């Protein structure tokens, strides 16, 4: 008789997750909780219980190879139960016929297969949401399999949305777990206290407490949902002037914002469109249906000349925002960002900002909370460019605010639309 040694002994918080019967588990943890050890042992347990194909996915191929293949695999899955290892493809076959494969999410198109029975998505907050939505979920739904999402937070991005979904008691197949770094009894408390002293409060709350906080490096660090988001239906005064602004997309979403401005120059974003793969006729229909007020001007990215021309044929006339007519493109972006930041600042006289957003404009709100500067590289100065990730609604807002606030004398021509051109 061969005695198989398996050294994994889950601590109480890990055991709670293992014992959950939920088909879909969302696990939000602080650093050093033991989430990767939990992930490989959860997958191993499921693979022993049922012959099938199981994946563990990390944000990059390099990460999954370094963390799982080169370290955790050897420490947590007994060699006696492994029939075959394939290092070039990063998979093992167990003696019961199950396969455990290790994948990186940096090339989502490679995440295709058949008969996937279960999947762990480790550090899901740092993957593109399409990894689950377009690649993994269809396979899991087809097989009736399971999935576990594990991550530390990264601002209020798609992992936060998934946590909200899983935490809703109406979604019976889902379970949400939240554990701090200190819930791992093997992580020395003195190390946690040292991290608290050496880390900013927001960073510590996110990395060690598992709290959803503002992302580090936020472009609009003035933005707060408590200050800038109207939870109740927005009050639109009769004297407000109404505008539209469009960032065109196809594979990426087309973002359209509706903005009302009062006589003091205070702005309210009160509606939005945020949708991929819209035909011009569909976009025109949506814009007209969502425009209950007289629209004084509609702005749009001048780079989308054909889209602007196509909308004209449907009776919607767009003023092209010429990004290089008065400044270099990068200066134009910085200028627009600075103007938005000015409007977000709370005014001393009123105690309120000059830019507000209706709560149902969720895509714009999400982008405002997750719009970050490019990361600093060790051998270079800190970049002053935002990351080109989920910035479509923010771009639409920037086009409008820059054009609305720049002095009229800087314009070469005055655009005067007729009533029939704008009253759609």
Image (cartoon, grey):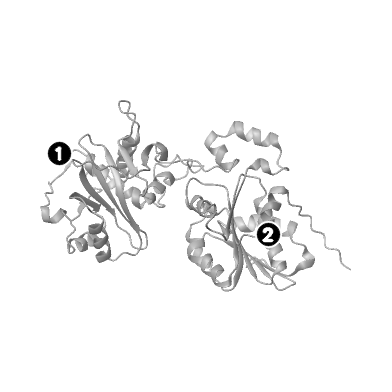
Q: Position of residue 224 (x, y in %)?
A: 41, 38
> In the rendered view, would you say 381 is above or below 176?
above
> In the rendered view, would you say 32 is above or below 308?
above
Q: Which residue is drawn at 35% across and 59% down?
A: 275
Mark 2 / mark 1, whichever is N-terminal: 2
Q: How far apart are marks 2 and 1 (CA)?
A: 65 Å
In which quadrant will I find the N terminus?
bottom right
Q: Position of residue 336 (x, y in %)?
A: 30, 42
Q: How many marks?
A: 2
In the image shown, does 287 or 331 lie closer to the viewer?
287
In which quadrant will I find the C terminus?
bottom left
Can residue 314 be seen from the camera position used here? yes
Q: Position of residue 165 (x, y in %)?
A: 51, 54
> In the rendered view, would you say 394 is above or below 311?
above
Secondary structure beneath disc 1? helix
Residue at the right extreme, as displayed: 1
* Left or right: 360 as drawn, with respect to 173: left
Q: Which residue is drawn at 50% across and 50% down?
A: 160
Which label was assigned to residue 26?
Answer: none
Can residue 327 be seen from the camera position used here? no
Which label was assigned to residue 42?
Answer: 2
Q: Quadrant of residue 59?
A: bottom right
Secondary structure beneath disc 2? helix
Within-10-Å neighbours for mark 1: few <14, some 14–19, many 20+: few
Q: Position of residue 304 (x, y in %)?
A: 26, 58
User: Disc 1 marks which residue?
Assistant: 409
Within-10-Å neighbours for mark 2: few <14, some 14–19, many 20+: some
Q: Which of marks 2 and 1 is in front?
A: 2
> In the rendered view, would you say 237 is above or below 421?
above
Cβ–Cβ under 8 Å for marks 2 and 1: no
* Left or right: 212 as drawn, with respect to 419: right
In the image shown, does 291 or 154 lie closer to the viewer?
291
């Amino acid at each position: 008789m061969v005695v198989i040694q398996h050294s994994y002994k889950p601590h109480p918080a890990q055991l709670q997750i293992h014992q959950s019967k939920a088909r879909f588990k969302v696990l939000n943890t602080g650093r050093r909780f033991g989430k990767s050890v939990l992930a490989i042992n959860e997958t191993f347990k499921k693979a022993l219980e049922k012959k099938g194909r199981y994946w563990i996915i990390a944000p990059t191929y390099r990460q999954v190879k370094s963390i799982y293949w080169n370290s955790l695999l050897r420490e947590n899955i007994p060699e006696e139960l492994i029939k075959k290892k394939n290092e070039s493809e990063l998979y093992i076959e167990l003696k019961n016929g199950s396969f455990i494969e290790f994948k990186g999410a940096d090339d989502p198109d490679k995440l295709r297969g058949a008969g996937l029975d279960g999947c762990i998505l480790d550090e899901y907050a740092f993957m593109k949401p399409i990894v689950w939505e377009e690649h993994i979920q269809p396979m899991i739904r087809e097989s009736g399999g399971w999935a576990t999402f594990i991550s530390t937070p990264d601002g209020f991005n798609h992992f936060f949305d998934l946590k909200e979904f899983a935490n809703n008691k109406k979604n019976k197949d889902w379970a949400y777990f939240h554990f701090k770094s200190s819930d791992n009894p093997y992580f020395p408390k003195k190390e946690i206290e040292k991290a608290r002293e050496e880390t900013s409060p927001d960073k510590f709350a996110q990395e060690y407490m598992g709290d959803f906080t503002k992302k580090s490096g936020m472009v609009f660090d003035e933005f707060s949902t408590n200050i800038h988001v109207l939870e109740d239906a927005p009050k639109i005064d009769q004297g407000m002037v109404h505008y539209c602004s469009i960032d065109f997309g196809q594979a990426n979403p087309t973002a359209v914002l509706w903005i009302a401005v009062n006589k003091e120059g205070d702005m309210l974003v009160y509606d939005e469109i945020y949708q991929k793969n819209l035909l011009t006729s569909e976009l025109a229909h949506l814009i007209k249906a969502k425009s209950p007020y007289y629209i004084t001007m509609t702005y749009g990215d001048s780079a989308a000349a054909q889209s602007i021309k196509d909308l004209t044929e449907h009776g919607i006339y767009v003023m092209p925002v010429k990004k290089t007519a008065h400044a270099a493109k990068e200066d134009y972006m910085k200028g627009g960002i600075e103007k938005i930041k000015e409007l977000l600042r709370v005014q001393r006289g009123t105690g309120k900002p000059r830019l507000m957003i209706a709560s149902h404009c969720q895509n714009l709100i999400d982008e405002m909370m997750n719009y970050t500067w490019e990361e600093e590289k060790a051998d270079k100065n800190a970049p002053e460019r935002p990351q080109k990730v989920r910035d479509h609604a923010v771009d639409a807002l920037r086009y409008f605010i820059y054009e609305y606030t720049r002095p009229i004398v800087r314009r070469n021509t005055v655009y005067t639309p007729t009533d029939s051109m704008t009253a759609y």
